[in-house]
Amino acid sequence: MPAPLLRIAHLTKKFGNATVVDDLSLEIMPGECLGVIGPNGAGKTTTIRICLGLTGPDAGEIEAFGLPLPAQVRQAKKRIGVVTQFDSLDPDFSCAENLRVYGAYFGLSRAVIDERVPKLLEFAALQSKANAKPGELSGGMKRRLSLGRALINDPDLLILDEPTTGLDPQARHLMWERLQNLLQLGKAILLTTHFMDEAERLCDRLLVLDHGRKIAEGTPRGLIAANLETDVVEVYGDGAKAAGLAHAALAERVETSGETVFFYLRQAKPLLDALADDHSVRYLHRPANLEDLFLKMTGRQIRDDA
């Protein structure tokens, strides 16, 4: 069995009296996409910063490619590509120049850079924008350029911190296609995201973090099956709350969020029959999904960034 590309064991980080990462352990294998999901302040970005040597841990062990971090972070970073939450493209350079300068940071030869830049522009679907500066690009184009730049050193591990935040659906789908291509090439990906459809589409395994601690781990479908009822009926409209009270016994679990009542159940037909003649409500019947899992495990309350 191959060794993990990244191994974290019992990682802990505190800021003052707040424990931001709490005894976290994880491994990423070659060719695997590991997703990390959790509310704001769960410790996702702090964990990534520790892996990149930008923040020091208080306890625990980290290895990348068998190298201890942060002691040998410079050597490990030669095999890591990073896309952060916010673009750090140089506004004064063209798309091609951004790639070239980044390649020089890794000490790549001019010949290697000349070979890779056209391929990465094609990968990012930016061939026609080679001479354009980042200020002339859409948000989706900037994110694709950031991904292309992260690949200039041909990394074995990609660390992506919310790479599609702020993108429209078309741009997100194109990014997903590019990331799936990378997985098929054997690259490993550590992905943090707030988009549950993104996590379900891309990730082989998921970690759910809350208050810095891992509260669940498994495949997306496995986590859903182990922790949720099979069906959800969302009821909304003037009579939704009254329906929630009247039909609560037909569901295993009932939750209210705003004007919507969520019925979580394994047999939906009795509830659907009961709602059929109720003209004070509208309803949607669907299978349980990762968003339901996320909300069950971490709650529906809004969190401030931390």
Image (cartoon, grey):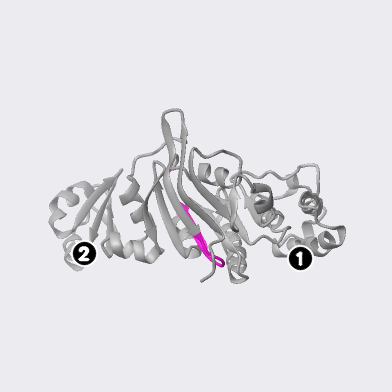
Quote the CA–CA distance across marks 2 and 1: 53 Å
Q: Which residues are magenta?
A: 28-39
Residue 272 — which label? 2
Decide which of tag 2 and tag 1 comes sooner along the chain: 1
Q: Residues within 10 Å of mark 1 (few under 14, many from 20)?
A: some
84 above or below 109?
above
* Residue in the foreground of this view, choosing between 248 and 49: 49
Mark 2 and mark 1 in contact? Answer it, CB < 8 Å: no
Identify the residue at horizontal 42%, vertical 32% (top origin). 18
Residue 163 shows in this picture: no
Horizontal side of residue 247 vs 205, given as left or right: left
Instruction: Indicate left or right for 126 with 39 as reference.
Output: right
Which labelled disc corresponds to residue 119?
A: 1
The quarter holding residue 56 reads top right
Of the pair 9 and 225, the residue shown nearer to us? 9
Is residue 126 found left or right of 12 in the rendered image? right
Residue furthest out toward the right = 110
Q: Position of residue 13 (x, y in %)?
A: 47, 38
**Helix, strand or loop at mark 2:** helix
Dot 2 amino acid type: Leu
* Label 2 environment density (alpha carbons within 10 Å; few <14, some 14–19, many ≥20): some
